[in-house]
Amino acid sequence: MPELARNPYSRLTTASDRRRGVVHRPPPIPGREARRPGSAEMLVGRDGHINASSRQDLANNLMTILEMASSGQISLDQPRRMETAASAYHNISTLQSNSELAAAMRDKQSGDWAELGAYLAGEVSEVATRDGFMRRVLRKFDAPAQGRILIRVRNNQVIAMVATSPVHMAPRFIRENDRYIEPPEFYVKANIRVDEIELVQNPGDILEEKFIETTQSIMVQEDRTLKRLMDNAVTQFGQLQYLAGGITPSNLGLLKALVDRWGLPSQTLLLTTDGMTDLTTSASFGTWFDPVSQFEVVSTGHVGNILGMTVLTDAWREPTLKVLLPSDVYVMAAPELLGTYTERGPVNSIAVDGYADGMPARGWMFFEILSMLVFNAKAIAKGTRV
């Protein structure tokens, strides 16, 4: 199966690129091989832990890794899953270059193009499950293979926020005799195409670029829907606060109390690069923040713990994969107290082409069927850094 690791020459700027005004950045190096800026010291040791001489040194090195990953200097993604996929899709296991990708694209008989789409769909599903916020802060409800979805809400006299589509949200008041919600299902879709001009002109790794495009359309859309749900939910019970001076111990304690006061123990803190900077550089936090040292855990966005809460961040994501605003800070209760999502199987792929419609391109339609709701608006608080 074609690995999604970058060709070392795939992002070098050529003379043709310069004429077209295109500049390719140098390829990121694997995170495990990263060194401190201006130093020969490795950031990650052979045992897979971030090198550090103290808790503060660990926090500083953690921020360095996150900033380097966000700027594209290093890659936190690990070369995993490829070996097992190769045996499953042996017909296209030798696709290692764009010329071979072109051969698969133009071969209408073997089915390799459809298999390649199925492989990409599986990769995107795994990345979304591993790295996406929505699938970690909401509880998964196992939908039946056929039929209606009914979500039981244990607490009454609460307001639920239901996603009716990826961009539309609707409040729902849960009364004493109204213990079930039937959330509407909707599609999350990605239309990915490779056209003939791209095949002959693109010096980069086209397969990897299409994988990133699909991830942006699927995982990012899931997380953006979650953010819209949360932003609507926090307005229902006064769970939105403006944090003067950024994240401080008192501001963080206030956000936590907004959730805890309802008897819903706060469990997750979700923040951005700016929020991470507050946690790791402010002396006022002292030893409150306990950073994670395992590089593989950090690569999922789980970077530490504070006040009994797991700290998740999108600081490591490339700009196109970020969903939070720089000022956003969220505190949430446990998934079983916050909300639910359902899916009708993993991401699906359908091979498509546009030749009959006058578009010389081939690609895939990726889609999944989801439902999503925050069934207790009291279980989340939001801070806006000012």
Image (cartoon, rainbow, N blue to C red):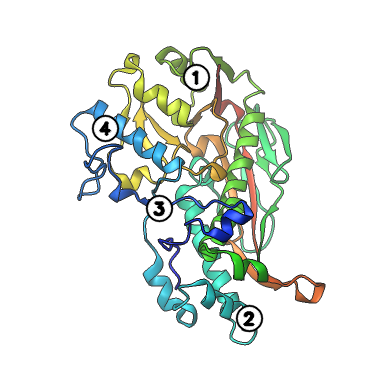
Which SS class for mark 2? helix
Identify residue for label 1: 255
Q: Nearer the viewer, mark 2 or mark 4?
A: 2
The quadrant where residue 355 appears: bottom right
Q: How far apart are labels 4 and 3 at the CA level? A: 20 Å
Earlier in the chain: of badge 1 and badge 4, it is 4
Q: How far apart are labels 1 and 3 at the CA level? A: 32 Å
Label 4: few (<14), some (14–19) or many (≥20) C-alpha neighbours in 10 Å: many
Identify residue for label 3: 77
Is 354 located above or below residue 17 in the figure? below
Which SS class for mark 4? helix
Q: Nearer the viewer, residue 172 or 372?
A: 372
* Dot 4 amino acid type: Leu
In this view, the residue farthest toward the bottom is 109
The numbered dot on residue 58 is 4
Q: How far apart are labels 2 and 4 at the CA level? A: 51 Å
Q: Nearer the viewer, mark 1 or mark 3?
A: 3
Q: How far apart are labels 1 and 2 at the CA level? A: 56 Å
Q: How far apart are labels 1 and 4 at the CA level? A: 26 Å
Earlier in the chain: of badge 1 and badge 2, it is 2
Question: Cβ–Cβ below 8 Å for labels 1 and 3?
Answer: no
Earlier in the chain: of badge 1 and badge 3, it is 3
Label 2: few (<14), some (14–19) or many (≥20) C-alpha neighbours in 10 Å: some
Which SS class for mark 3? loop
